[in-house]
Image: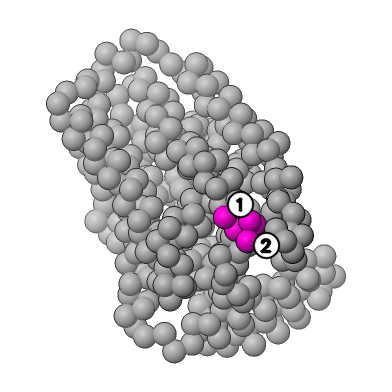
């Protein structure tokens, strides 16, 4: 049995799925009712062009899914069909929506990929390299955005006076998070591409200390994963990495552009690059939130980061609409795909006595 089986079984139980979803809905309704002013809707206009922007938003949602599917097929050397790739990505996204953002769906993803016939070692490598590519995207793109927008415009946000201000300021908090992402990316790159065994030994020695000893087993497993990943990726051509990074860039860009399209449905947007950048900043903050999929926190900070681009009173209604377009669809799709996937995958092994995770 896969070492994460019991964890997956608990995670995918009905109680653990429905509870965070309900909490997220309650939080969104509370924020909406607390800040909603019906007169603000008069500032939102629906015109013929709104249908075009709605179509563009839907295209971005589809493009994001296709880019994810292409990347998982690329990383598995096309071992997964397009159908299986759809199931894997749908369930991966689903797991990410019902688990705290700081936890994510990585453990579930390893298990799902493994159940599709990929070895445990390769599954671990695939999930780890996707994390590396995602972090690399932020490392590369954020300085470019800062270069074209300037820090004065980028960090001139209402969050400074919305309870998110500290002595560092928003810019200080953001760049501190950005530096952490850089360090993580560099460490993973060093471990995978240069010295996997040395990196593993360093982790083990570090976590043998009294302060970190309680996480020793986790650190050892991480070191083993790095070594496995390095072996799996050894000898990959430059074209492989270019395709992997480009598909990652398409995936994230499609995610961020949904907000641009959503705002254009109702109000004229002056600076699309600023909105794209602010959405990226929101996402970096959501990476460390304890609620499932960032529920509650996402709706709260949306207005703070994009309020200067949105007429007063519309921030919270649009925040809820944003979550309806970028969060809840993955829950719905996951609930549809999950039982079908379980029947397909576990039906093949039912004779071996493998129990259903939802039983």
Residue 160 appearing in the image: no
Instruction: Please name which of the two marks, 2 or 1, marks the residue nearer to the observer.
Output: 2
In the displayed orientation, state which residue is furthest to the front. Answer: 351
Q: Nearer the viewer, residue 270 or 166?
A: 270
Res 83 label: none
Q: CA distance from mark 2 to mark 1?
A: 11 Å
Residue 284 percent across, percent down from the top left: 48, 51
Q: Nearer the viewer, residue 320 or 160?
A: 320
The residue under label 1 is: 342
Label 1 element class: helix
Residue 218 appearing in the image: yes
Do tag 2 and tag 1 residues touch (Cβ < 8 Å)?
A: no
Residue 15 percent across, percent down from the top left: 71, 36
Residue 261 percent across, percent down from the top left: 26, 38
Residue 340 is one of the magenta-drawn residues: no
How many neighbours does mark 2 have within 10 angstroms: few (below 14), some (14-19), or many (20 or more)? Answer: few
The residue at 67%/77% (across/down) is: 223
In the displayed orientation, state which residue is furthest to the left. Answer: 48
Residue 345 is one of the magenta-drawn residues: yes
The residue under label 2 is: 349
| Residue 227 to residue 75: above or below | below
Identify the image quadrant of the C terminus: top right
Please state the extent of the stretch shown in magenta in the rendering: 344-348
In the displayed orientation, state which residue is furthest to the top. Answer: 39
Label 2 element class: loop
The residue at 21%/22% (across/down) is: 46
The residue at 39%/50% (across/down) is: 280
The quadrant in which residue 237 appears is bottom left
Q: On the picture, is 159 further left or further right than 266?
A: right
Identify the image quadrant of the N terminus: bottom right
Residue 309 percent across, percent down from the top left: 29, 33
| Residue 205 to residue 167: above or below | below
């Amino acid at each position: 049995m896969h070492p994460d089986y019991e964890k997956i079984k608990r995670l995918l139980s009905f109680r653990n799925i429905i509870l965070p979803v309900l909490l997220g809905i309650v939080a969104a309704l509370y924020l909406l009712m607390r800040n909603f002013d019906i007169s603000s809707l008069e500032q939102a206009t629906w015109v013929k062009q709104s249908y075009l922007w709605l179509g563009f938003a839907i295209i971005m949602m589809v493009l994001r899914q296709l880019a994810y599917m292409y990347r998982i097929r690329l990383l598995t050397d096309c071992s997964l069909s397009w159908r299986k790739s759809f199931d894997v990505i749908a369930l991966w996204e689903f797991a990410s929506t019902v688990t705290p953002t700081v936890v994510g769906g990585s453990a579930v993803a390893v298990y799902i990929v493994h159940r599709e016939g990929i070895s445990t070692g390769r599954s671990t490598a695939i999930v780890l390299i996707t994390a590396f590519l995602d972090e690399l995207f932020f490392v590369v793109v954020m300085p470019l955005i800062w270069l074209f927008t300037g820090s004065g415009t980028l960090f001139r946000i209402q969050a400074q006076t919305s309870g998110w201000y500290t002595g560092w300021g928003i810019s200080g908090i953001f760049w501190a998070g950005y530096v952490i992402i850089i360090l993580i990316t560099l460490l993973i790159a060093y471990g995978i591409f240069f010295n996997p065994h040395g990196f593993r030994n360093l982790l083990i020695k570090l976590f043998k200390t009294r302060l970190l000893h309680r996480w020793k087993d986790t650190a050892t497993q991480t070191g083993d994963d790095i070594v496995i990943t390095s072996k799996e990726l050894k000898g990959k051509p430059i074209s492989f990495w270019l395709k992997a990074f480009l598909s990652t860039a398409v995936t994230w860009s499609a995610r961020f552009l949904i907000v641009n399209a959503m705002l254009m449905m109702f109000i004229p947007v002056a600076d699309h690059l600023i909105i794209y950048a602010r959405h990226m900043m929101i996402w970096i903050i959501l990476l460390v939130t304890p609620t499932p999929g960032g529920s509650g926190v996402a709706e709260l900070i949306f207005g703070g980061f994009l309020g200067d681009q949105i007429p007063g009173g519309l921030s919270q209604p649009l925040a809820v609409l944003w979550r309806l377009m970028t969060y809840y669809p993955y829950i719905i799709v996951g609930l549809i795909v999950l039982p079908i996937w379980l029947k397909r995958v576990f039906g093949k092994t039912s004779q071996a006595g493998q129990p259903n995770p939802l039983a």
